[in-house]
Amino acid sequence: MRPRLRRVIWIAPLAILGILLFVFIGGEIVMHLWNWLLPALFGWRQITFWQAVGLLALCRILFGGLAGRGFHRSNFRRRMAERCANMPPEEREQFRERMRARWGFGPPTGESKEQ
């Protein structure tokens, strides 16, 4: 047997076991935290293990995305930094002023706050 195939044969079951262990531990933590805090604070019902696993998956989809560890956001920041680095100073200042006006980051650098 080739060494690479032998390594895959060992890694695949360990990866599956790791995923199952993560789901079990994560589900248990979510279930226990929910059942400890929310019924006492808000009067909500207790949840089962499978509801906790579903809540864990929902939070992963909503807050973690489906693509992994925030790849798209960090890629966006890198592209914007490159784009700003290649702009001449006048164009960069115009861009900043448009962003401030659009998103409300405060007055542009040319205006005073006392108007």
Image (cartoon, rainbow, N blue to C red):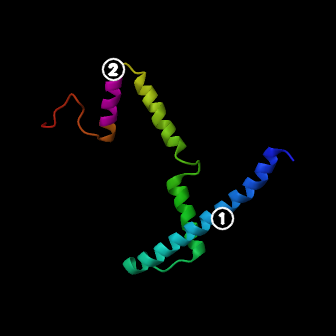
Q: Nearer the viewer, residue 18 or 90?
A: 18
| Residue 96 colored in magenta in the image | yes
Q: Few, some or many C-alpha atoms within 10 Å of disc 2 (few <14, some 14-19, many ≥20)?
A: few
Horizontal and vertical percent position of residue 77: 45, 36
Above or below, comparing residue 98 to residue 53 in the picture: above
- Tell me if 34 is positioned left or right of 90 in this view: right
* Quadrant assignment for the C terminus: top left
Horizontal and vertical percent position of residue 44: 44, 79
Where is mark 2, residue-wise? 89
Q: Secondary structure at mark 1?
A: helix
Q: Residue at x 55, y 66 (%)?
A: 26
Which mark is drawn over residue 20? 1
Examine the residues drawn in magenta and state their main secondary structure.
Answer: helix
Mark 1: which amino acid? Leu
Above or below, comparing residue 7 to residue 57 in the picture: above
Give the magenta part as a residue range: 89-100
Name which of mark 2 and mark 1 comes first in the sequence.
1
- Tell me if 83 is positioned left or right of 100 in this view: right
Q: Nearer the viewer, residue 101 or 36?
A: 36
The residue positioned farthest toward the right in the image shown:
1
**Residue 21, quarter of picture:** bottom right
Mark 2: which amino acid? Pro
Horizontal and vertical percent position of residue 16: 70, 60
Above or below, comparing residue 86 to residue 74 in the picture: above
Q: Secondary structure at mark 2?
A: helix
Above or below, comparing residue 78 to residue 90 in the picture: below
- Tell me if 80 is positioned left or right of 66 in this view: left
Q: Residue at x 43, y 21 (%)?
A: 86
Q: Nearer the viewer, residue 23 or 3?
A: 3
Q: What is the distance, in whole Å, between disc 2 and disc 1 at their CAs?
A: 53 Å
**Residue 112, quarter of picture:** top left
Q: Residue at x 37, y 18 (%)?
A: 88
